[in-house]
Amino acid sequence: MGNRLSKIYTKTGDDGSTGLGDGSRTGKDSLRVAAYGTVDEANSCIGLLLAAELPDDVPDDIRDLLTSIQHQLFDLGGELCIPGHSAIDDGDVERLEQRLDHYNETLPPLKDFILPGGGEAAARCHVARTVVRRAERETVALARVEVVRPQAIRYLNRLSDLLFVLARVLARASGHGEVLWQHDRRR
């Protein structure tokens, strides 16, 4: 691939529009731009998580998994940016499910809600999870008015679940432990 971005500013968006991957233009406030923009934000949150020092007891493959997810989120952003394009498939969703099951089986069953926290890496993972949930909501909103492949929505749904489980793994490995919601604190 040659130089695709030789000039960073083009001034073509000064009117409030932006170019989609198929060459068409749409408003910067469109549902499509919101969806792929939030996918990009989620990707940045995972980058911030990867920039944190992960606890020593964290399985070695988590960093590789998160980097792989970043690539897939970039692919998903492209799918959402190019109407009719497909980049995420059923196999991508199944691989998330496999990793989710793998990490979840090492954790004790949940008996209480967990608050975001449990050390820096776990807290960053919770932030990434909530941004992925927003990306999912915005993609669902887009799917109500335009064609969106179901794999995109399923991918975001499983990814937020995986990030929840990874936050639990990170919190436990950090020594901080999980922060449990105290539902009876006002009694």
Image: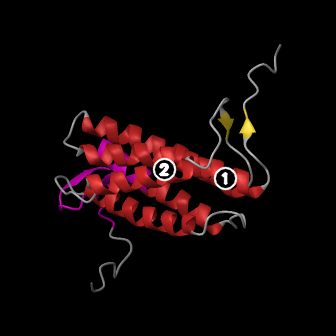
Residue 17 is one of the magenta-drawn residues:
yes
Q: Residue at x 71, y 46 (%)?
A: 117
Judging by the rendered image, the residue that carries numbered circle 2 is: 100
Furthest residue toward top: 187
Res 29 seen here? no
Along the line of sight, which residue is nearer the eye, 118 or 24? 118
> Which mark is on residue 122?
1
Question: In the image, is residue 105 above or below residue 50?
Answer: above
Q: Residue at x 47, y 55 (%)?
A: 99
Mark 1, other Cα within 10 Å: few <14 / some 14–19 / many ≥20: many
| Percent coordinates x, y for residue 44 in the rendering | 51, 61
| Percent coordinates x, y for residue 128 in the rendering | 55, 51
Question: Element at badge 2?
Answer: helix
Res 92 seen here? yes
Q: Quadrant of residue 23?
A: bottom left
Residue 171 is one of the magenta-drawn residues:
no
Q: Quadrant of residue 182?
A: top right
Q: Which residues are magenta?
A: 11-39
Q: Residue at x 34, y 42 (%)?
A: 139
